[in-house]
């Protein structure tokens, strides 16, 4: 793993100090390829956190306990262990007769044991349901991570084509070192947006790779979302 990849990993694991986080953001700002790799990993981490957690079924737990429990010896194994286990015995006529009876009973039981007959019953499988051709599927959504370094800001939000240019709809959260972040789901497309600091100062994203004029002399950041 290279040093930039290790830095990205530590950033995602929240293992950087505030000063190191600032250095990291400055590094990805200067390297577009590293910035794209970081944003892709951010989306992967966010998607993984949204996956459902599977709980083991009661049947699985019971089968697991049964497999870990020591096997129960069979009737014949118990008899054989009782007969073959060395022990000190004080023999007399009554004891010899009792032992002979036990052996005769064991032999008779062994001869009468028959394996159980297993009957296999075929089970009809339910027909699988197929999705009719031509069914419309919902457009996929891509989770995009927006990041802004503003240590002195009291609040930061984002306004753009995706929320009707209303900054109240998409606030960013502050983390250590004055880093503000937000993860938003977007459909594939091209979007213009700006950050709003303290509810009044509109600034373009310094990490954006493209910008377009808004028709009033200002530049909006441009975000291309594709699959």
Image (spheres, helix red, strand yellow):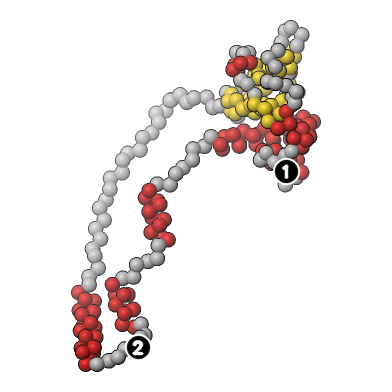
The picture places residue 14, in percent across and down from the top left corner, at 67, 38
Side (left or right) of 138 relative to 180: left
Disc number at residue 6?
A: 1
Q: Given this view, does label 1 or label 2 mark the residue nearer the observer?
A: 2
Disc 2 marks which residue? 88
The image quarter in which residue 190 lies: top right
Q: Residue at x 61, y 27 (%)?
A: 183
The image quarter in which residue 130 lies: top left
Reply above or below: 221 against 32: above
Reply above or below: 16 against 116: above
How far, Cα to Cα, is label 1 from label 2?
Answer: 70 Å
Side (left or right) of 225 relative to 98: right
Side (left or right) of 131 relative to 22: left
Q: Nearer the viewer, residue 44 or 19?
A: 19
Q: Nearer the viewer, residue 41 or 97?
A: 97
The picture places residue 120, in percent across and down from the top left corner, at 26, 56
Sequence-wise, the earlier of marks 1 and 2 is 1
Q: Secondary structure at mark 2?
A: loop
The picture places residue 96, in percent across and down from the top left corner, at 23, 90
């Amino acid at each position: 793993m290279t040093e930039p990849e290790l830095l990205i990993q530590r950033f995602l694991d929240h293992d950087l100090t505030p000063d190191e986080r600032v250095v990291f953001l400055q590094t990805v700002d200067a390297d577009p390829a590293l910035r794209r790799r970081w944003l892709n990993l951010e989306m992967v981490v966010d998607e993984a956190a949204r996956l459902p957690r599977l709980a083991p079924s009661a049947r699985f737990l019971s089968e697991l306990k049964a497999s870990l429990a020591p096997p129960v010896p069979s009737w014949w194994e118990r008899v054989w262990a009782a007969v073959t286990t060395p022990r000190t015995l004080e023999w007399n006529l009554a004891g010899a007769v009792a032992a002979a009876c036990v052996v005769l009973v064991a032999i008779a039981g062994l001869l009468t044991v028959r394996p159980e007959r297993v009957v296999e019953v075929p089970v009809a499988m339910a027909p699988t349901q197929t999705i009719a051709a031509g069914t419309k599927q919902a457009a996929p959504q891509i989770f995009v991570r927006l990041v802004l370094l503003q240590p002195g800001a009291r609040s930061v939000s984002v306004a753009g084509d995706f929320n009707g240019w209303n900054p109240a709809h998409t606030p960013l959260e502050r983390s250590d070192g004055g880093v503000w972040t937000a993860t938003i789901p977007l459909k594939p497309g091209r979007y213009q947006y700006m950050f709003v600091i303290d509810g009044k100062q509109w600034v373009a994203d310094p990490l954006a790779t493209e910008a377009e004029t808004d028709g009033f002399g200002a530049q909006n950041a441009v975000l291309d979302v594709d699959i």
